[in-house]
Amino acid sequence: MPYGKKDRSTGWLKHNRQVRRGEVSFKVWAPIKRRPTEEQAAEWEAAGRTVRRDPNGRPAVQVVGFRLAATFDLSQTDGEPFEVPTVQRLRRQRFSSAGSPRLLAGDDPTDAFDDTVKLIKDAGYSFELAAPGSPQLGSANGVTVGGDVMQVQVRNDVSTAQRLKTTVHELAHIRCQHLTGARVGENLHRGRRETEAESVAYIVCKALGLDTAAYSDAYVMGWSDGDIDLVKQCAQTVLRVAKQILTDLTPAQTDSDQDADDLTGLGEPAGPYPAAA
């Protein structure tokens, strides 16, 4: 970071650390940010460059160039302890600021609830909308019980958007084989199981037109504890299961539909899904 302004609002001074006398800075290319004029924005757009604009259409503050700036390494400073801002730490800070998962409000735009319930029943589980505090469900939004019970319960007092999200989450537990013991050799602790199920729910719902970030972000960060290695371990299973569920939720084409697609060239893949969560 740079030395910092005298008012201690930037650089090492902001973190109550002082560059030692005699230390020599090294130079880095630092971005120059400002709001371009409309004329500059028009020139950039004509040249094929993307210009970010605010909601009113005015060019937003953005990087317009670079300059050489003096900076110092942590080892060149003294002062209060400084924790390097790793990705894991930033994710934990984001979770702390986000607080608890927020239940989704509003209607379910996907029209996929009944089909999702059918996939749960096809897997051999019964399904029930239950009141909070009822047996099995307790204080949870949803629960999947295996063994001799084979039942999924979802709260009956939430919005239809939240109901769909939770139902997909419980289906994900089933499809990820969290209750069967089939994934021998994998450490399927609670944090990993919940991270996988909610990540699948986020991808599936997003692809269907329901953004669950208000709930899913905090939920995943909480159960993963911001552990990037854990998220990476989950990625292959999450993407495989999300693709599988989306494929199963995609209506099969009739012969006439296929003929129309062949004629118009407008055919779509059977299982549209995002590349990453």
Image (cartoon, rainbow, N blue to C red):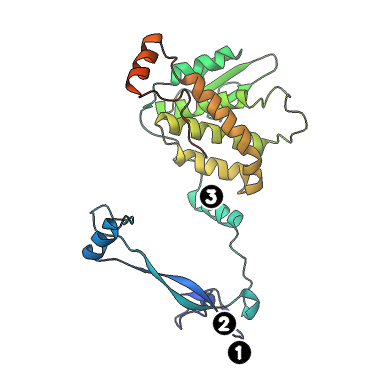
Taking the spot 62% from the left edge, 43% from the top edge, the residue there is: 231
Residue lying at the far right of the rendered structure: 185
Residue 98 horizontal side relative to residue 64, left or right: right
Q: Amino acid at mark 2?
A: Ser
Q: Quadrant of residue 145?
A: top right
Taking the spot 61% from the left edge, 38% from the top edge, the residue there is: 235
Q: Position of residue 95 (x, y in %)?
A: 53, 50
Residue 121 tag number: none
Q: Residues within 10 Å of mark 2 (few under 14, many from 20)?
A: some
Viewer-side label of 2, 3 = 2
Q: Quadrant of residue 61?
A: bottom left
Regarding mark 3 in the picture, which secondary structure is present there?
Answer: helix
Regarding mark 2 in the picture, which secondary structure is present there?
Answer: loop
Identify residue for label 1. 21
Taking the spot 52% from the left edge, 44% from the top edge, the residue there is: 218
Count numbered badges in the picture. Answer: 3
Task: Tell me, yes or no, whether the two marked residues, 2 and 1, touch with CB atoms within 8 Å.
Answer: no
CA separation, marks 2 and 3? Answer: 35 Å
Residue 34 horizontal side relative to residue 215, left or right: left
Viewer-side label of 2, 1 = 2
CA separation, marks 1 and 3? Answer: 39 Å
Q: Quadrant of residue 16?
A: bottom right
Identify residue for label 3. 95
* First along the sequence among labels 2 and 3: 2
Q: Residues within 10 Å of mark 3 (few under 14, many from 20)?
A: many
Q: Position of residue 223 (x, y in %)?
A: 61, 41
Q: Amino acid at mark 3?
A: Phe
Regarding mark 1 in the picture, which secondary structure is present there?
Answer: loop
Identify residue for label 2. 25
Q: Position of residue 74 (x, y in %)?
A: 62, 74
